[in-house]
């Protein structure tokens, strides 16, 4: 097999505030044949997710930052096009953290084969992948939903939030979803079956939220922070649980917001209301992958879970798409279609 | 029996900031004989605790505020001096929320008999009472100490903190206690067996704390808030647990502190370090009273737990003593000796 041309997108510079196009660089290079034990992969789908903003920074976080000049990290669905690894044969469809590139090589570690007859392969990056498992594990382990409780979900039309809210409905909760703009809000109630959808961009959002939760909030699934958190915080009930999954409103912050310092007020509410605020990432619950695939796969098959994909075509579109994601421009799970199967 | 003269201290006005003497009023009145099913109690010991500051305010909290003119709420150890209740006989020693008064009446609900042969009766207000059970349940249920972990305790020479740290040692933790002033700090290591004692009043406290926890902090038992929390926060490890038991540094606050607003930084750390911050009060774990009495009673008997009492003599001294408690002036469990047995 002749050497292939590979296209990849590398981190060119660390963003200050919002990422810009110049923070990414498109690179063309040849990619050699797979070595012993390796597979050569052709990327079909690339997942774009909010956590990528964190990887572009060198601030301490749960994952090592990407290095300047390194391929942008990311999960993808790929096809095996050459294999020196007995565990994989040409034509296999796999999911793994293969990065923002058209081709990649791997020794097989971290790759998981997916069965294309069960569901569209792109779902391995969404409802049946990292975002779906994030929703499932965070809601069940930390949120601990009980029938009759009120669950509020931020970024509710997104890849994680949409699944959180639907699992909340399956568990018998009253579900209030928060999203940006009328189309997303309508989708929450008309398509996903949430009890209420609210637009956090309207001026009286906080009042609308208060009216939407007459019994207060028992679980707040935090994806956002910022003014959404400000509206939620005073409505939290005694013994409320707050799984902290993401804080997209703050990822582009360059300085802390002006005062007063509201940390003491937060801690006083933690004490008097006996709140539980707990951060997590999906890897913390890796042992629950079997449960997740069984339950969410079953609900999907039974028609109890819907999902929506927002597809961008062509690897070169990934930077603008990620910049838009951080501004809430996507509508559903954001994917880049890199190549046809 | 002729009517007795009762002395009590009532809430005269709600404090703005620090309570002052005029927020309390001393009242003398007669107390009638117990009615059917009632007991008449003579208060021997009154407990003074930080939560009382909250009861003086009408801000939303975990307990109803005291009303103006109402006897100040508080736990006490009393002797039954007259009884129309079959469950109690004259001479019984009981513990209950009898308030800041020399005598009280009760229908028996909320009273618990204590055995004066097991331990000094004042311990029913300390190590074997609410503070001890607060320490035990908060540390074990939320802190979840594992051998080899680092536990940091604020207000470590106080009624709760001293027990938290000693249970931490029993569980195999490295224990760092924080207190105010050299005498208390020395007591932590020399008497209680903590690994390190630190004085939060010294200018380089934050640096000393950093040096004292070379492996970071796995559990922070929060009694204080303020600049102690500020020093602890950056040192919290991944998966650290923060039982929030009290925030004495903020109880007298009249306004939020100046900015910047550090809430987003806190929430980002919750996410990236997967912190668990959970508030509690002892009543949340009432079902564990049997475990508490068995374990802490056993450790006390075995000489594994020490305690220290700071005794004020005379009910009329209670207001100044509580004002001092909120400034950290007490050294050990603060008690008012109201009368001899």
Image: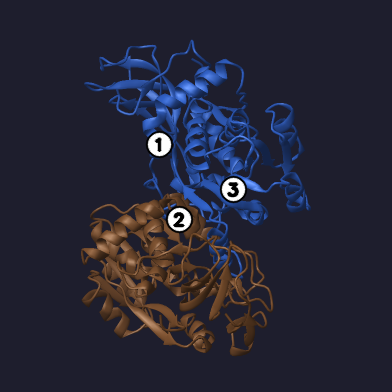
Chain colours: A brown, B blue
Count the labels in the image. Answer: 3
Residue to which mark 1 is pinned: B285
Q: Quadrant of the N terminus of chain A?
A: bottom right
CA distance separating discs 2 and 1: 19 Å
- The answer to whether residue A41 of the structure is visible from this angle is yes
Residue to which mark 2 is pinned: A269
Which element type, helix, strand or loop, lies under badge 1?
A: helix
Q: Residue at x 68, y 79 (%)?
A: A69
Q: Quadrant of the C terminus of chain A?
A: bottom left
Q: Residue at x 63, y 68 (%)?
A: A35
Camera-side residue: B129 or B269? B269
| Location of residue A151 with respect to A125 vertically, above or below | above
- Residue B313 percent across, percent down from the top left: 58, 26
Residue B79 quadrant: top left
Residue to which mark 3 is pinned: B224
| Location of residue A314 with respect to B45 vertically, above or below | below
């Amino acid at each position: 097999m002749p050497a292939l041309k590979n296209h990849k997108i590398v981190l060119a510079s660390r963003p200050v505030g919002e990422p810009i196009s110049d923070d990414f660089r498109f690179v063309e290079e040849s990619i050699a044949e797979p070595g012993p034990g390796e597979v050569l992969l052709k990327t079909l789908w690339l997942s774009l997710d909010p956590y990528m903003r964190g990887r572009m920074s060198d601030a301490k976080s749960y994952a090592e930052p990407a290095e300047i000049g390194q391929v942008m990290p990311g999960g993808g669905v790929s096809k095996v096009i050459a294999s020196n690894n007995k565990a994989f044969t040409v034509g296999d469809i796999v999911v793994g953290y293969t990065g923002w590139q058209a081709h990649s090589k791997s020794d097989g570690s971290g790759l998981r084969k997916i069965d294309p007859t069960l569901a569209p392969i792109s779902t391995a990056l969404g409802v049946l992948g990292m975002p779906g498992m994030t929703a499932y594990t965070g809601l069940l382990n930390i949120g601990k939903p009980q029938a009759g409780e009120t669950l509020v979900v931020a970024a509710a039309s997104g890849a994680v939030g949409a699944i959180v809210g639907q699992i909340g409905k399956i568990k018998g909760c009253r579900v209030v979803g928060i999203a940006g703009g009328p189309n997303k809000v309508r989708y929450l109630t008309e398509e996903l079956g949430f009890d209420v959808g609210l637009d956090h961009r309207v001026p009286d959002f906080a009042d609308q939220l208060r009216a939407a939760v007459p019994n207060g909030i028992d679980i707040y699934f935090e994806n956002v922070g910022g003014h959404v958190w400000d509206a939620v915080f005073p409505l939290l009930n005694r013994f409320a649980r707050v799984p902290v999954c993401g804080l997209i409103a703050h990822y582009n912050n360059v300085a802390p917001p002006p005062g007063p310092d509201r940390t003491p007020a937060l801690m006083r509410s933690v004490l008097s209301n006996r709140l539980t605020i707990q951060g997590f990432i999906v890897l913390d619950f890796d042992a629950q992958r079997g449960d997740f695939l069984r339950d969410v796969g079953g609900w999907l098959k039974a028609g109890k879970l819907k999902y929506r994909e927002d597809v961008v075509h062509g690897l070169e579109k990934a930077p603008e798409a990620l910049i838009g994601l951080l501004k809430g421009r996507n509508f559903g799970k954001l994917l880049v279609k890199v190549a046809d199967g």
